[in-house]
Amino acid sequence: MANFDTLRIRAGYDSKDHNYAVSVPIYQTASFDLGSVDRAKSLWALDEQAGIYSRVGNPTVSAFEERIAALDHAHSAVALSSGMAAISYTILSLTEGGGNIVAPRALYGGTEDSFSNFFPRFGSTIKFVDNRFDPESYEELIDDKTRGIYIETISNPNAEIYDIEAIAEVAHRHDIPLIVDNTVATPYLINPFDHGADIIVYSATKAIGGHGNTIAGIVEESGKFFYSEELFPQFYEKSHKIRNRIGESRSAFDIDPKGPLVIHLRAFYLEFIGAALSPFSAFLLLQGVETISERVDKQTRTAEKLVKYLEGRKEVEWVKHPSATNSPFKELADKYFPKGAGYLFTFGFGGTERQLNEFIQHLKYFSYHVNIGDVRSLIVNSPKTTHAELDEERLERAGINENTVRISVGLESPEDLIKDLDDAFNAVFSR
Ligand SMILES: *Cc1c(COP(=O)(O)O)cnc(C)c1O
């Protein structure tokens, strides 16, 4: 297989199949002609993989799915209309019938809140670990209803890193998959499948699209995890809906024993809950992914410079990023993130809430809005915005303080960004 930088440009698309169009065309159509009754039969039997109806498949969306799958060497992938759809579909499908998932509390705000307060309504519970950096802590919570372990490869917002391989080992000892949210890291900084992850979920809204213009998500599976019938009977249930050409009911496992989750998601979750990605969004994401290496690389280098700068300011109480001087994640970062640990970090603002508000107002080149991985640099006061849904106790357990400020570094000149921060500190603290 070609290298990453070739795949992010070439994978998932052959112009010969699309009127020799160089750029992936936007198939802005709800439905596709079936051609003939016989062809319709093969389409429904999944013998021929082509468009039927854009809720469950569309060529522009497929090109995006195949491209991201190629970057992670995934067996299969399904794109969805948001990162939250990717997470919800994955958790709900794995825990069908009352299963649970083991996870840390330090998660993207929406993930933490849905894990705590929303999925349990459907009988899918989350068991939160006490010591998220200790693999044994995960193992202690696994019971006969546990259907997976869930972590973020680089956590949002504090850029924490787990020993992914050690946690994968725990999951595999119990025949359950390790699911990772690789949104912050992106396929450029790490391939979680190389370190034992079995399922990857992304918010493609963030650094995959990279330009802050599209909401999207994707779920991938490695093709290496064996879902046992005892723990995952839903993948073995025969359904007329996914019958073969001669009308015999099949299970997701019958269709693809290496990737039953993606089959199950497409045939049931996408079909019936319907968080379909639009072809136009897929086009924007494909455009974004063509420059992912240069973007994430520069954003990571600039983040390292900003971390250094902030560590030198007396108004900054601490900086959390694996490149920070006293980071406890240096060793894990060396092992899992040789290209650097990304463009997202937090710092403790050493002033009053009013001073922080003034500081944010004063910045010219850091937008005050909630996104990450954008070409624009962004700043937010996490406890009041991205993690505002967490109460005090949950904030504390997620490692978020009253004065936590999160920065996602964009592609502006690092010198201008540092000067911008400098001017804002000087303006606020000279009064
Ligand atoms: C933004 C984000 C999500 C949610 O994705 P949406 O595309 O906004 O639905 C999930 N996980 C992480 C780490 C995120 O940053």
Image: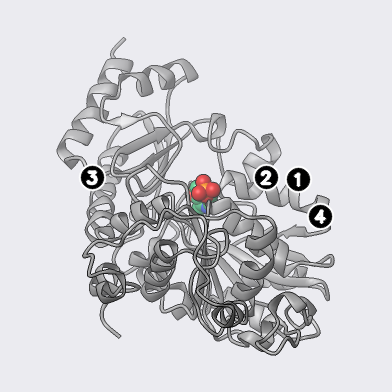
Q: Does dot 1 land on a helix, a strand or a loop?
A: helix
Q: Residues at badges 1 and 3 in contact (C-beta under 8 Å)?
A: no
The residue sitting at 41% across, 79% down in the picture is 73
- The residue that label 3 is drawn on is 411
- Amino acid type at image mark 2: Asp
Look at the image and tell me whether residue 220 can be seen: yes
Q: Position of residue 153 (x, y in %)?
A: 49, 63
Q: Is residue 403 left or right of residue 167?
A: left
Q: Nearer the viewer, mark 4 or mark 2?
A: 4
| Left or right for 367, reference 169 | left
Mark 1 highlights which residue? 117
State the SS at label 4: helix
Can residue 324 be seen by looking at this rendering?
no
Could you tell me residue 251's position as x and y percent?
72, 83
Mark 3: give few (<14), some (14-19) or many (20+) Cα within 10 Å.
some
Q: What is the x, y in percent for residue 328?
A: 45, 58
Closer to viewer: mark 3 or mark 4: 4
- For residue 315, which quarter of the picture? top left
Q: Which mark is residue 113?
A: 2
Label 1 – label 2 distance at C-alpha:
6 Å
Q: Quadrant of residue 91?
A: bottom right
Mark 3: amino acid: Leu
Residues at marks 1 and 2 touching, judged by CB atoms closer than 8 Å = yes
Q: Quadrant of the C terminus?
A: top left
